[in-house]
Amino acid sequence: MFSKDSDEINDLFQESLLNLWKGLPNFQGKSDISTWIWRVCFNTCVSSERKKKRNITVPLPTDLNLFEDKDEDSRQIRMLYDRIHRLKPFDRAIVLLWLENMSYEEIASIVGISVKNVSVRLFRIKEELKKMSNN
C-alpha cells in the first residue's frame, strides 16, 4: 500500500528485511514477534515515504497490462485500492492492517497509538473514503 511501483515494493521489502535483521538483537520480547515485525516494516515504509517527499521524481510507466480485468468486481477493487493509496501514509497503514483482519489492539501496538485512537482513526478514514467515492 505504500507504492504502486513493483521495483519500489521490492526495495521496501529488501530494506524491511535488512532492518529486521539489524534489529533482531534488540528485540526484547515485550510484544509478540509478529507485532514487532509489522512495526519494523511499518516504520521502514513510513521512513521511505518521508525520503520520497524530499526527492520528488516522476516515474514513467513502462508496463501496460493489456489483459486487465474489466469485470465489475475488479473495477471496484481497483477503485478502492486507488482511494486507499490517496490516503496519508499513516492512515494507509492503519487500513492495511485492518484489512489484514488485525485486532484494534494489534494495530495500536504496531503503529504506536492507543486502541481508542485506532477506532477513531478508522472511523474517520472510512468517512474520508466515502467522500472520495462521492467525488
Image (cartoon, rainbow, N blue to C red):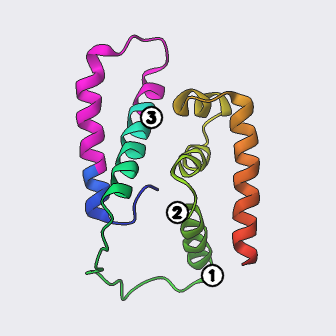
Tag 3: residue type? Answer: Trp
Q: Gap in Å between the C-alphas at discs 2 and 1?
A: 20 Å
Provide the residue designation for mark 3. Answer: 38
Tag 1: residue type? Answer: Glu
Q: Gap in Å between the C-alphas at discs 3 and 1?
A: 32 Å
Magenta region, residue range:
12-38
- Mark nearest the camera among 2 and 1 is 2
Provide the residue designation for mark 1. Answer: 72
Crowd tier of the residue under label 2, counting other residues whose Cα lies within 10 Å: few below 14, some 14–19, many 20 or above: some
Q: Is residue 30 above or below residue 130?
A: above
Q: Gap in Å between the C-alphas at discs 2 and 3?
A: 19 Å
Q: Are marks 2 and 1 in contact (CB under 8 Å)?
A: no
Crowd tier of the residue under label 1, counting other residues whose Cα lies within 10 Å: few below 14, some 14–19, many 20 or above: few
Q: Main secondary structure of the magenta part?
A: helix
Q: Which mark is residue 85?
A: 2
Q: Residue at x 76, y 48 (%)?
A: 123
Task: Say whether disc 2 or disc 1 marks the residue closer to the N-terminus.
Answer: 1
* Residue 57 picture location, percent across and down: 30, 68
Q: Is residue 134 above or below residue 7?
A: below
* Residue 30 picture location, percent across and down: 48, 11
The C terminus - image quarter: bottom right
Q: Quadrant of residue 23?
A: top left
Left or right of 98 in this view: 32: left
Tag 2: residue type? Answer: His
